[in-house]
């Protein structure tokens, strides 16, 4: 029986923990939160700082693991890479992990590898960022160089005042794990993600996902749909861009989640994570829409086993939509019985009555989700949007 170490044991990691057990592996879940929900599903739970390379290396050695995976998150990617390096395990190296989590290093890799990417400048201070902003011909984006979940990202219009600009800069800086901020060319157009498995240096594209986000300035993701509703020629442009980006990063034996935007038919890579994508894209939508078990494939990659990349279940269209009610104190939720419809594959409400629902500034502020399975992607979207409209979160000023 192989031993798999799963770094993080939150809601998004539970499908990976469960799948690895179904596959017959012994699962060790590690998380800094002693109440992590995934702990109850693992064979062994260890409460530990998963961002500490030395602590996790000691755990990996003492448990004599055969593989390590950090699904749907980036906070401990360098830790995973270090463990792989030190123990000679399958998966990305520490160097590759840094390149896949630091947006500046990622942009440099894309540039060197000829992968399409927006103009991007790493800044030293808020004043430095303001100086570079003056030279942008269009709107720009401020983003933390190391973060995830839309945290700290904001669109900056050309007409912004210096005071407001500095406020957005400080917001990005607070969310940056390495305390640097990028200012980038703003790309206008539809956004996609591409779900990929890389095995033995071969890049396998499993699915292309259409994204739905809020408007500026924060661009919080509110939905994802598979397969893409776009014409095949646009899907190919997006796919080719993602593949070129994965090659530029040089990662191997892992899952990848590439984010791409199309502006006037030209692709731009936003970023690529060398991991399973979050928001249930890789763990749920991909197997629902393709029949291919991406989670099992990622587990096998981590354990050095060739992944099975063929359909093992019937494929349908699938989408997820997130609830984003008005901020305030939650006093009622109406029409929840609509979630009993057979087209609802999964749903969850993240807040209880009496909780304070925050302003929607990042993915952490969303209030719940619903996953729909239907015959076509548009029908899945239509029904999901109907539920989002009819299920009412009633809030009052706190």
Image (cartoon, helix red, strand yellow):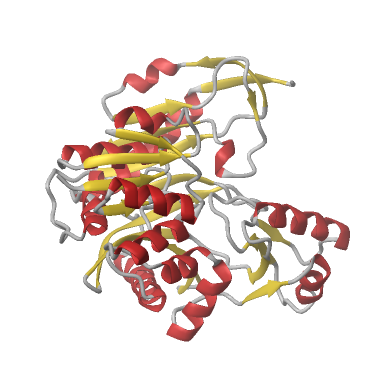
Residue plotted at (83% across, 56% down): 164
Is residue 270 among the parts visible in the rendering? Answer: no
Is residue 159 among the parts visible in the rendering? Answer: yes
Residue plotted at (47% across, 40% down): 48
Where is residue 81? Give x, y as percent: 40, 62
Where is residue 262? Give x, y as percent: 47, 68
Q: Determine the image quadrant of residue 155.
A: bottom right
Q: Choose between 208 and 114: the one closer to the eye.
A: 114
Which quadrant does the N terminus fall into?
Answer: top left
Q: Choose between 222 and 165: the one closer to the eye.
A: 165
Considering only vertical position in the picture, is 56 above or below 110?
above
Residue plotted at (30% across, 42% down): 16
Left-right relation of 136 to 54: right
Residue plotted at (28% across, 62% down): 89
Considering only vertical position in the picture, is 321 above or below 334?
below
Where is residue 196? Give x, y as percent: 30, 62
Q: Determine the image quadrant of residue 84.
A: bottom left
């Amino acid at each position: 029986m192989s031993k798999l170490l799963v770094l993080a044991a939150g809601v998004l990691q539970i499908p990976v923990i469960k799948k690895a057990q179904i596959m017959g592996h012994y699962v060790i879940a590690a998380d800094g939160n002693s109440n992590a929900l995934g702990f109850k599903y693992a064979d062994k739970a260890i409460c530990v700082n998963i961002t500490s390379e030395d602590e996790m290396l000691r755990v990996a050695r003492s448990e004599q693991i055969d593989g390590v995976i950090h699904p749907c998150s980036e906070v401990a990617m360098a830790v995973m890479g270090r463990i792989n390096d030190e123990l000679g395990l399958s998966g990305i190296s520490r160097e590759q992990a840094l390149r896949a989590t630091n947006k500046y290093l990622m942009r440099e890799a894309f540039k060197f590898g000829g992968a399409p990417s927006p103009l991007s400048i790493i800044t030293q201070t808020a004043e430095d960022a303001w100086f570079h902003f003056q030279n942008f011909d269009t709107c720009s984006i401020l983003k933390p160089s190391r973060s995830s979940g839309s945290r700290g990202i904001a669109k900056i219009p050309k007409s912004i005042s210096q005071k407001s600009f500095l406020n957005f800069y400080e917001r990005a800086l607070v969310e940056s794990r390495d305390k640097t901020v990028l200012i980038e060319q703003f790309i206008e157009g539809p956004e996609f993600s591409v779900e990929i498995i890389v095995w033995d240096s071969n890049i396998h594209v499993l699915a292309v996902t259409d994204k739905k986000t809020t408007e500026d300035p924060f661009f919080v993701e509110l939905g994802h749909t598979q397969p893409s509703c776009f014409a095949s020629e646009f899907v190919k442009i997006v796919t080719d861009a993602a593949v070129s980006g994965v090659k530029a990063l040089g990662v191997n034996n892992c899952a990848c989640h590439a984010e791409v935007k199309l502006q006037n038919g030209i692709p731009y890579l936003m970023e690529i994570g060398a991991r399973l994508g979050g928001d249930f894209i890789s763990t749920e939508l991909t197997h629902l829409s393709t029949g291919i078990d991406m989670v099992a494939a990622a587990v096998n990659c981590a354990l050095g086993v060739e992944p099975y990349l063929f359909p093992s279940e019937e494929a349908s269209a699938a989408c997820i939509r997130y609830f984003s009610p008005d901020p305030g104190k939650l006093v009622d939720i109406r029409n929840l019985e609509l979630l009993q419809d057979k087209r609802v594959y999964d749903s969850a409400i993240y807040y209880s009555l009496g909780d304070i629902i925050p302003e929607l500034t990042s993915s952490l502020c969303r209030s719940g989700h619903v996953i729909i399975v239907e015959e076509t992607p548009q029908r899945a979207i239509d029904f999901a949007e109907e539920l989002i409209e009819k299920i009412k979160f009633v809030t009052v000023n706190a």
